[in-house]
Amino acid sequence: MDINMTLLGQTIAMIVFVWFCMKIVWPPLIGAIDRRRKEIADGIAAGEKGQKELAEARHGSEAILAEARQKAVQVTDLAHKRGSDLVAEAKNVALAEGQRLVAQARGEIANEQNRARDGLRKEVSALALAGAAKVLGREIDAKAHAALLDELAAELEKGAPARG
């Protein structure tokens, strides 16, 4: 019968031990396990939230980069257009200035030609009168000489031959 009493004593001891563990030991262990489980769940949720925010940030940064690239392209295109406009404007100004200088030079050339022709006409008429005076053997008076020179100059301007 020792086996029955021993068995009964061990059963009672086991029941007391289980009751003691359930009332005293398990609640702190279960609380610690629940806290750890909650921390792990919170950590997983925070990690997923962080990954979601990271994905959104990447998407946002890609959008900002694309917009910045587009603006950079627009700015460079505008700068190239403005540069081309400035070059074209400078060419037009230079062309107009060149044409103005050419016209001015042509006017000066025409003036010099007219002065040279007038000078040559006066010299030719003086030589013609000197030659005519020698042929005639007499000198024409100053008034007649001036009138004859003017008449000869007028005829030379018209292109008509001089009268002798």
Image: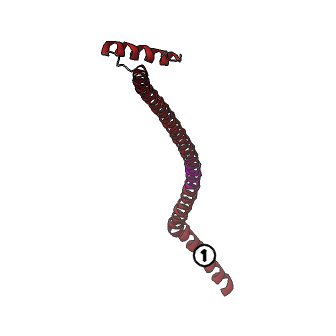
Where in the figure is residue 93, as x and y percent of width and height? Answer: 47, 33
The image shows residue 6, relative to residue 149, as above or below, that is below
Please identify the dominant SS of the magenta region: helix
Where in the figure is residue 66, as x and y percent of width and height? Answer: 58, 46
Q: Is mark 1 on a helix, strand or loop?
A: helix
Where in the figure is residue 49, as x and y percent of width and height? Answer: 56, 52
85 or 58, nearer to the observer: 85
Q: Which residue is drawn at 48% across and 32% down?
A: 102
73 or 142, nearer to the observer: 142
Q: Count numbered badges in the picture.
A: 1
Where in the figure is residue 17, as x and y percent of width and height? Answer: 56, 74
User: Dot 1: few (<14), some (14–19), or many (≥20) neighbours within 10 Å?
Assistant: few
Residue 136 location, quadrant: top left
Residue 1 shows in this picture: no
| Residue bearing the label numbered 1 | 14
103 or 91, nearer to the observer: 103
The quadrant of the picture occupied by the N terminus is: bottom right
12 or 150, nearer to the observer: 150
**Three-letter amino acid code at disc 1?**
Met
Magenta span: 48-61
The image shows residue 24, relative to residue 110, as above or below, that is below
